[in-house]
Structures are given as structure tokens and as C-alpha cells.
Amino acid sequence: MIHSIYNQRFEVIERAPGRSAPDRADFTALFGDASDPAGSTPEAPAAPNSTSGSTQAASVPSGQSSLGDPDVQLWLNNYYAELSASNPQFANSATIPYQPAPGKGADNYPAGSVYGPQQIYTQALYNQNDGLFSALVGRDPSDSMSQLPGIPTQPAQQAYDRELALENAQRLALGQPIDTAAYWSDPGPLNFDGHTYTSQELGYCGAGQSSSPEPIYISQGNQIPGTNTFSVPGYSGAVTGIQPERYYTLQQLEQAGLKSGQPDAQFHPGSWSTATT
């Protein structure tokens, strides 16, 4: 039973960070690699012909004096409520332990690490999955987990926001949907290749807030041999008339032939929820 649950969860969670093209390191550069013992991620160099208009610290939602500690359990409750609506096997997954016992677990996020709000939550998902695997092989689940990252330093927040804004400016310039992950603060307008994008165009909708699921990446490896059709990660069926090595919204893929009404297989970054304790 545990083995079956683990396999089902592994398929979904492996899709969670799958935003980047195989030949790019955007996810690792922006959010860190949960499998990397070092845990730190170098700041990617700024691209040419781009300027950012913001250096402010993390702003906060109206009426809130500080961003506050994240309510990880509430985020997991909401995440699995969305997921189980079309995948009933995840209905009770929010109760799976998501952090190691006190004094145990790796510390993969040293001071200065660059990551976004959603890394706190995705690390909780990794911990749940790793804990289940440890149960399969008879190990202490805490031994395979990592301590959840806290709020990063102000320079790290700003570095993350700059990288995400630049990534989204590049996507917009190529006519692709943006990465919907949350920002720490308003990145401000950004000029890229002669066009100025507003923070709203770049995906900012409030500190720590994400408005929609991540788009789906279709790679050359998804092409069905001998055809001009492509499989869609996490979904049944195929699409035609698209270009590989690009991101697409689910609606765009359904317009390209993907059957609608299938169980949700997109990753929902979710939004910052503040602990009330």
C-alpha cells in the first residue's frame, strides 16, 4: 500500500519542478535543487540589454505589517484539495509529515541562498515524498528530509526577483506564457530588448502570491516517432501543430488537440499563507 502511494506521489511531485527546458538550468538557478547536498545556488549573470527598475525589499499584502512565517500546513491543505479534486488518491496526503524531527534532517539552505517563496512549500513536498520512501526501506524518515528554508536575506530576495522577472521578460518576448511562481516583492518594470514590461506583465500579483498553475513545457523528446505529434507530460493523448522546446498553457494544448477534462497534472505554485500562531 505504501509502495503504491509513493509511486503515485512520485509521478506528481517529479512534475512539480519540471519548468525548465532540458538544456537550461532555470529551476535550479532560481529555486535551488532539493537533491543537492550543498543547497546553495549561484546567482545567474544578468542578460544583456536588460535593466530592472526595482531594488526594494519584500512588500506585503494590504493590512499586513510583515510577510510573516509561512503556514506550510495550510498551503499543503489547499494544494492537496486542488489535486485530489481530480486525483482522489491524494485526498489524505496533507497529513503526511513534511518536516524532520527536531535536530534531524539536512540543512540545504545556507545563508545567502537564492530561492523563491514556493521553495518553502516544494521542499515540504519533497520531504513528504522522501519520508514515504524511507518508510519503504525501513529508514528513519527524518534522515532523508531537509529542514524547511526560512525567509532568505534581502539581497537573496532581490536576486531571485530579478532572475524571475528576466526569465518572464524573455518568455514574453518569445510569445510564451510566463512562469507563474510568486515574487518576494514587486520587481518593478523591466526593459528587455527595447520593450518595457510592467511588473504585472511579468507576473507580479502581490508579495508571495501566485495567480495560476505553471505552464507546461513540451520538449523535442515528447515528439512521437515518425509523426508531427507530441505527448503532453502528465496527460493522455497528443497534440499537433505546435513547436517543441516551448511552454504552453493547458488551454493552448487543448486547442492543439489534447482531450479536455482530464485529471489536473499541472503544478500549482500556490500563494503565501501566513501562520496565525
Image (tube, rainbow, N blue to C red):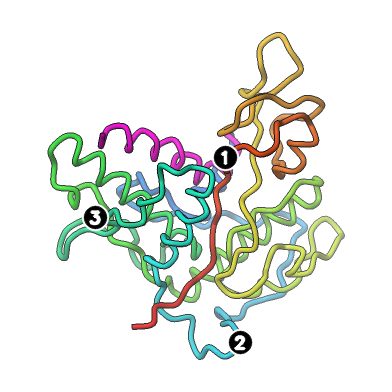
The residue lying at 67 percent from left, 68 percent from top is: 204
Residue type of the residue flagged with mark 3: Ala
User: Helix, strand, or loop for circle 3?
Assistant: loop
Check disc 2 and give the amino acid type.
Ser
Q: Amino acid at mark 1?
A: Pro
Residue 201 in the image: state x and y as whole percent.
77, 64
Q: Quadrant of the C terminus?
A: bottom left
Question: What is the magenta range?
Answer: 1-22
Residue under numbered circle 2:
62
Report the mark closest to the observer, 3 or 1: 1
Provide the residue designation for mark 1. Answer: 263
Label 3, on which residue? 106
Q: Is residue 69 magenta?
A: no
Ranked by sequence position, the earlier of labels 2 and 1 is 2
Per the model, the C-alpha gap separating discs 2 and 1 is 35 Å
Total numbered labels placed on residues in the image: 3
